[in-house]
Amino acid sequence: MINTRILLSVFILKTQTGRPELTPTAIKAGKLLARRLAGHSAELMNYDNVATTVFTPLEYGCVGLSEEEAEMRHGKDGIEVYHAFYKPLEFTVAERDASQCYLKVVCERAGDQKILGLHFTGPNAGEVTQGFALAFQCGATYSHLLQTVGIHPTCAEELTKVHITKRSG
């Protein structure tokens, strides 16, 4: 029988090839590898839609492709980038500078406008990003985002209202 701990250790070392070096990612990938080796599954790890957050005083969270990665895969004319600055309620009450609170949704330009990447800077970015990570697994589109009723007043609500594109100026 293969020792799962050894497999996980070996796999964690190999994540230095441009894949997310996150503990939950390594655990998930290791479990999938163990299942494949045991013949119980053929499922591979999807590294494109791994949500992550940088826990700094102003958090940054993302899931999916960056704008640059999406452009490389789909071409500059093949993507649409929606973005907005916003002011969180807790910044209003405390009179804090909200000039760095920003969100970006990268979508395919054609068809249903499948969401390729979501980037969020602001309070609770980890919580917001984790919530949207599930939507990525289900093939979320820009229309799905606009059809979602946001919880008021939350930072995540801002993503359901984004409509300005970079292309529009």
Image: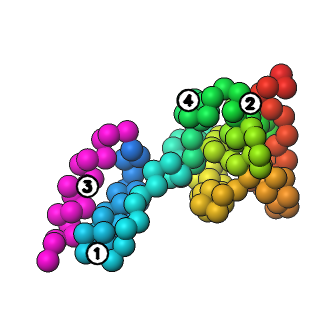
Question: Between tags 4 and 3, which lies in front?
Answer: 4
Residue 166 shows in the view: yes
Instruction: For residue 93, say whether it is visible.
Output: no
Question: Which mark is nearer the camera, 2 or 3?
Answer: 3
Which quadrant of the rendered structure holds the C terminus? top right
Distance between the alpha carbons at the discs numbered 1 and 3:
18 Å
Q: Disc 3 marks which amino acid?
A: Phe
Give the residues in magenta: 1-18
Q: Which residue is mark 4?
A: 72
Return the residue nearer the eye: 27 or 116: 116
Task: Please give the name of the residue rendered at 30% of the width and 69% of the height, measured from the top-left corner.
Answer: 36
User: Mark 2 belongs to which amino acid?
Assistant: Ser
- Residue position for label 2: 99
In the rendering, which numbered label is found on residue 39?
Answer: 1
First along the sequence among labels 1 and 3: 3
| 75 on left or right of 87 | left
Q: Position of residue 88 (x, y in %)?
A: 78, 45
Disc 1 versus disc 3: nearer the observer: 1
Image position of 133 (left or right of 153): left
Question: In the rendered structure, does residue 11 fall within the stretch colored magenta?
Answer: yes
Residue, disc 3: 11
Mark closest to the chain's N terminus, 4 or 3: 3
Q: Residue at x 41, y 58 (%)?
A: 45
Q: Is residue 25 magenta?
A: no
SS of the residue under disc 1: loop
Q: Nearer the viewer, mark 1 or mark 2?
A: 1
View extreme (left): residue: 1
